[in-house]
Amino acid sequence: MTREFFLQDGWETSFVPHAYDWASTPLGEPAHWPQSLKTALARMLGSDQPMALAWGTDLILFYNDACQSVIGTQPALWEQLSPGMERVRDTGIPASITAQPVLLNRQGFPEECYFTLSFSPIPVDDGTRTGGVYCTFHETTRQVLSQRRFGTLAAVARVDASMLPTAEAVGARLMDVLSKNPQDFPFLILYSQPDPVSPARLLAHSGFADKNHAALPETIPLRSDSGTWPLSEVFGMNGKSLLFDLPPELTVLPPGPVPSRALLLPLLVPDQPQALGCLIAGINPRLALDEEYRLFLDMAARPIAAALGRLKTLEEKPKNIVENDQLIRTLIMQAPVAMGIYRGADFIIEVANNKLLEFWGQSAYQVMNKPLFEVLPELKEQGVEAILKKVFTTGQRFFGSEYNLHLSRRKKTEEVFVSFALEPLYDDAGNVTAIMAVSNEVTDLVKAKKEVEESEARQKLAIEAAEMGTYDLNMITDELIYSDRFARIFGMDPTQPLNRNDFRNRVHPDDQAARTKAHEEALKTGMLLYEARILWPDHTSHWVRLNGKIVFDANQVPIRMHGTAMDINEQKMQSDRLEKMVEERTRELKEINILLKKSNHELEQFAYIASHDLQEPLRKIQTFADIIQQNVTHSGTAMKYLPKINDSARRMEELIRSVLNYSRLSMNGQSFEYTDLNQVLENIRDNFELQILEKRAVIQSDPLPVVKGIPLQLNQLFSNLIGNALKFSQKEPFIRITARFLSAAQIRIPTDAQPDDKYLELVFRDNGIGFDAQYADQIFTIFQRLHDKQTYAGTGIGLALCKKIVENHHGYILAQSEEGSGATFYIYLPLL
C-alpha cells in the first residue's frame, strides 16, 4: 500500500515544513531526509518529463507537476504500479512496461489510456541498497488505439466476401472479425435493407449475452416511427451517420463497460441508389468519440456495404485483397503515427504516410516505389532486413519495443529509438505479398530515461570519489538542504538541526570578505566558487572549496542555489610544502649556477694560459736548443742532453694542444649536419696509411650509415679509436667495425633514454694488448694512462676526447676488454 504526497507548489516551497505534516509520516521532517532522497526529489520536481518517485519500504509516493497534469490523482493507478516498483526496489534492476492500460478521469469520464512506464532504482546515500524508485511516464494512447484499429481493418480486408453466398453469411463472418475488438465495438448489430419498402432484416450481431434482447428485433419497419432503432431517419440523411442515445430498454450489458450511445452507420455503395443496410455500433464509454474513432467505425462499415452490394447485383468478383486497398491506404495516410506498406520480397515502398516520411527525413518523390533498403541502406545491417524477411516468409507478426537504430537523415547519422509493429498482408491464395509497418519514435523518452539513470550514477560516483558534500539552498526562504558529509566538512554534527547561519559563522573572520565577494559575483554570473578556512569546534582551521550554481526564475530573480563543498586542507598543506621545497631548490640552483660560472671562468683562464703563457717559453726552449745543437759540436755532454730538451718540449706542446682540444669540445658551438661515416673511415685510412702498411694492419668494416652529427668531431672519434688500436698492438693489427640500429632498451649500459628511442650502435674491435676489465671506466678519464710513456707514447687524453665527443652527440660509450685479448668499444649515437 502506497502513501501519496503531491508537492503542489514546486521546488521553491516543496520542503516547507508547514506544507504537510511530514512528522506523521515514516519519512519524518524534511530536514532529516536522506540526501539521496532530497537529490532525487530535486531532479524530479525540476523535470518537464512526467515522473513519480516512490521511497522506502512503504513506497511513499511523490510526483511532479507534469505527472499531475497527465495523470492526476488516481489511487487505482498507483495500486497498479506498486508491484513493478517493489520489484525494482527489491532487486535494483531497472524495468519497463509497454502499453500499460490506465483509466484516467481527464475529460469528465473514465478514459481508456495507455502508457509506457520506465522504472529506475535510486540508491541510498552509501550505495549499499536501493532506497527508492523513479517512474517516468510516456503516453502512447494514440499509438495503441491506431495499431489496434488498423489490425482490425487489416483482418476485415483479408476476408474474401465473394465466397460467402448469402447476406447472412457475410454478416456472420464479418461480425465475427469485428467482435474480436470489443474495446472499440462493445456491441454490433447489422441490418440489411433489400428494397425501399420492405422492413429492415436482422443479419448478425455481437456483444449480446441474451439473443432475445429488446435491441435485436428480427425486422424493423421503415415507414413507421414505432421501430426500435430509427433506421428510417438514418436512411433519409443522405449517407450521414446518426449518434443515438440509448433508452433504458435498449441498454446493452456487454462484458466490458456499458455503452450509453450508439452510432448508426448507413451501408452505401457507389452503384446503388439507396442504403443496403445499417451497422449499429455501440460506443465505448471510455473513449472519446473523436474524428479518429468515427473514421474507424466508418472504415469498418465499408467492407460490409461492399459485400452486400456484390450480393445484390449478383456480380462475382475475384478474390483479391487489393479490393480493400483503398480503405487501408486512407487509414494509413490519416494515421497519427508513422505507417507504411512494403510490397514483395524486395520490400518496395508502396505506401508511406507523412509521419513516416518525416521520420525518415525523406520526401515521397525520393522513396516511393523503391526498395526499402535502397532508400535506407544503413538499416540493412542493423537487423531490420532479417526481421522483415522473417515476417514475410513465416507470416508471423512482429512487435519491437525501443529498438535502437542509426538512421541517416537530414545529412547526418542520428541514433534513434523506435517501437514498431509489422503485420503481414496476404493475397487470394493466402500468400504474404506485403508487410504493413506501424512505428512510433520514442527517442526522447529513451534518452530521458537513460539521462536520469546516467546522471544519478555519475553524480553519485563523482561525489563519492571526490569525498564532496552537497547542498541545496532555497534563496527565497533561506532554507538549506545538505548532505551528512557537507556538515562534517564544516566540523558539525549532521544529526543536529542546522541552518544557513550555522554554516556561515564557521568561515574564518579573515576569509569572510572573500566569501561575500564570491556571492556577489555569483549573483551576476550564476556561478559560485571560492576557498576559505573553516573553524571547527576544536579551534582547528580547515581549508574548504565551495562550488555552486544559481537558478533564476523567468524574471531573473535568484530562487535556488545548489552545489558542493570539498575539504582541501591536505591539498593546501601539500601545496605549501611544495612551495617551500621549490624555494629551497631554487636557492640551491642559484648557488650551483654561481659555482658553475666560476668553474667555467677558471677553465677559460686555464685554456688562455695554456695557449699563450705556456707556449711562449716552450718556443724559446726549442729555439735555443736548436741553436746550441747547431753550434756546439765538440761537447759530448751538450749533444747528449739537447735532444732530450727538444723531446720534452715537444711532449709538453702536445700535452697543451690536447688540453686545448678537450677544452674546445666542452665549449662546443658547432652545428650538426649529415655525415657519411664511410667517408670518415676512408679519411682515417688515409691519415694512418704509413702505419697501416708498416704494421701490416687490416681494417674491416660493415657498410656504415649517414648520421647527423659534427663532422670534425666524428673524424676525431674514429681517429682516436683506430689510432689506439694500431698503437696498442704486439702483432699484426686486425680492426673490425660493425654498425646496426637498435632501441634504447637494447643498449648495454643503463641510460636515461626512453625505451623506444632509436640509436645507432658502432662497435670497434681489435686484437691488441687489451686491458684489465677493472679499468673499463677509468680509461675515459683525462690524463689517465695504463702504460708508461716509454713503452707506448701518448698524452692520456685520447679516450677522454672520445667520451666527450660521444656526449656532445647525446650518446653513450662503453669499453670491454681482457689483458692480451684485444679491446671492444661500443658507441651509441641517437638518431636525430
Image: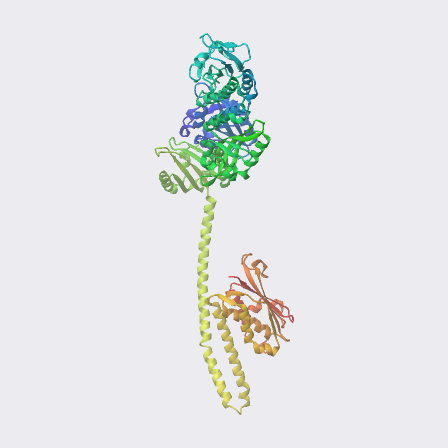
User: In the rendered view, would you say 220 is above or below 773?
Assistant: above
808 horizontally vs 238: left or right: right
User: In the rendered view, would you say 198 is above or below 818?
Assistant: above
Q: Residue at x 42, y 14 (%)?
A: 236
Q: Do we see residue 796 in this rendering?
A: no
Number of numbered tags placed on the structure image: 0
- Residue furthest out toward the left: 555
Residue 93, by quadrant, is: top right
Q: Nearer the viewer, residue 479 or 266?
A: 266
Q: Nearer the viewer, residue 114 or 283?
A: 283
Give coordinates of residue 149: x percent, y percent.
Answer: 50, 24
Give coordinates of residue 358: x percent, y percent.
Answer: 45, 34
Q: Do we see residue 77 in this rendering?
A: yes
Q: Nearer the viewer, residue 812 or 662?
A: 812
The color scheme shown is rainbow
- Residue furthest out toward the bottom: 634
Q: Nearer the viewer, residue 471 or 254?
A: 254
Give coordinates of residue 230: x percent, y percent.
Answer: 45, 11
Give coordinates of residue 808: x percent, y percent.
Answer: 50, 65
User: In the rendered view, would you say 550 is above or below 105?
Assistant: below
